[in-house]
Structures are given as structure tokens and as C-alpha cells.
Image (cartoon, grey):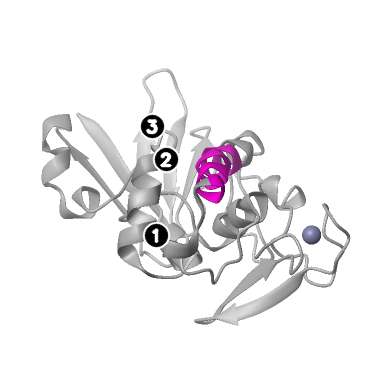
Amino acid sequence: MVLVAHLGMSGQLILSDSARPFAGHTHVVLHFSGGGQLRYVDPRTFGEMFVTEESDLGEIPELARLGRDPLAGEVPVDYLASTFARRKTRIKPLLMDQTFICGLGNIYSDEVLFLAGVRHDRPTPAVTPAETRLLHDAIPMVLRESIQSRGSSIADEQYRDLYGEVGGYQNRLRVYGREAQPCLRCGTPIERARWSNRSTFYCPRCQS
Ligand SMILES: [Zn+2]
């Protein structure tokens, strides 16, 4: 049996001792035989949690649609290159498309694109083989760094780690949220572009 959890917009999984009072919006409580609880807290209830057989995971529509998981195994350079050539879209929305690769949202796609020196609005067929290799390396690197720093909590501090603490990766972000601050690589002020109600941060000199 496997437990599947989707945190939605505001879900939190919190490890707690059993005596601690429940936070508001605690929807699921898992009791460990060795003591303690895992609590699922979700004010906006866009999240989801269920138990299923491992053999049935491929039948679940939400999971079957998901693309490659960069932390479950290497995402081959060829898979990136062929998708870039075929999809004919802009690079940032493609990186955020969970049917292509899972795990990159608005913040981490900006970080990946900065590391690879690629601008957010580059048409995907124009991404060069050298840039594709840089993206291939940057995607798992950013995700691993973030996990090592217990994730990113931005201004709303909505995201919390397993112990209910704010994450640490927001303090290590190279480009996201750094509008007008000097680029860590070249010193040029970081720019902010607005695109479908979200903000994109990039260096106008290092990214093209
Ligand atoms: Zn720069």
C-alpha cells in the first residue's frame, strides 16, 4: 500500500507529538506505532490524500498525467531536446508544465533558467544543445539544493517544513525575488517581468 498526498495550494504535513493541540484546518491525523503523529493541515482544501495499491498508481488520472520526476532518475538530455523541438512554446511555461517535468514551479523555473543562462521567454526550438545540457544539470541541482535547505517559504510563509518551520532556500535564491538587486554573476540589476499574473525574475545580461 502507498499513501499519496498532494499539498495543493496550502497543504502542510507536520510531524507532531500526540499531546500537542491540533492546528485549525487539521484534516487527517496518522498515528505512528512508535508514538507521534503526522498531521495534514490545509486551510484552502485544494490538497488531496488517499491510500492505494502500488500496482494501481498508473491508473490514477492525476498521477498518470505527470511527466518525469528529476529526483527519481535522470531526465535524459534527448528527452529535453526532443520536447523543446516539438512543443514550440516558451521555455518557462514548458518547464512549469507538470506533464513534462514535475517539481518546477514559478520560483524554481526562474532559478533553473538563470543557472542555464536562458531567458524565460525564449522559444523552445531555439534552445541550443549546449543550453539544453545546462538545463539538464540545473533542474535536479535546484531541487536538491532546495530540499537540503528544507524548501522555500516566501512572503506569505505558507510553506512549512515537516517540523512546522519556515524553509531556508528563500535565502539562497539566486534570482527569484531579487528585482533591482545586482546579479550574483555580473552585477547587472535583476529585472522583473509580469506574465499571466505571476512574476518572473531574470538577469538581462546573463540570460538571453
Ligand atoms: Zn548577470
Q: Looking at the image, is 22 positioned above or below residue 55?
A: below
Residue 79 relative to residue 52: left or right: right
Q: Choose between 131 and 2: the one closer to the eye.
A: 131
Callout 3: 10 Å neighbours few (<14), some, many (20+)?
few
**Marks 2 and 1 close (CB-CB < 8 Å):** no
Q: Decide: is 164 above or below 153.
A: above
Dominant secondary structure of the residues highlighted in magenta in the image: helix
At 60% from the left and 45% from the top, the residue drawn is 151
Q: Residue at position x 39%, y 38% from top?
A: 75
Which residue is nearer to you in this view: 164 or 128?
128
Marks 3,2: beta carbons within 8 A = no
Q: Amino acid at mark 1?
A: Gly
Where 172 falls versus 155 (above or below)? above
Q: Amino acid at mark 2?
A: Val
Name the kind of residue labelled 3 in the image: Ala
Q: Nearer the viewer, mark 1 or mark 3?
A: 3
Q: Tell me how far mark 3 sits from mark 2, CA to CA.
A: 15 Å
Which residue is disc 2 drawn over?
77
Of the two numbered discs 3 and 2 on the same chain, state the one appearing first in sequence.
3
- The residue beneath circle 3 is 72
**Residue 186, x across and y down, in percent:** 85, 57
Q: Which residues are magenta?
A: 130-143
**One can see residue 58 in this view:** yes
Q: CA distance from mark 2 to mark 1?
A: 30 Å
Q: Residue furthest top?
A: 34
Query: Residue 8 — which label?
Result: 1
The percent position of residue 85, horizontal first and vertical second, equals 35, 59
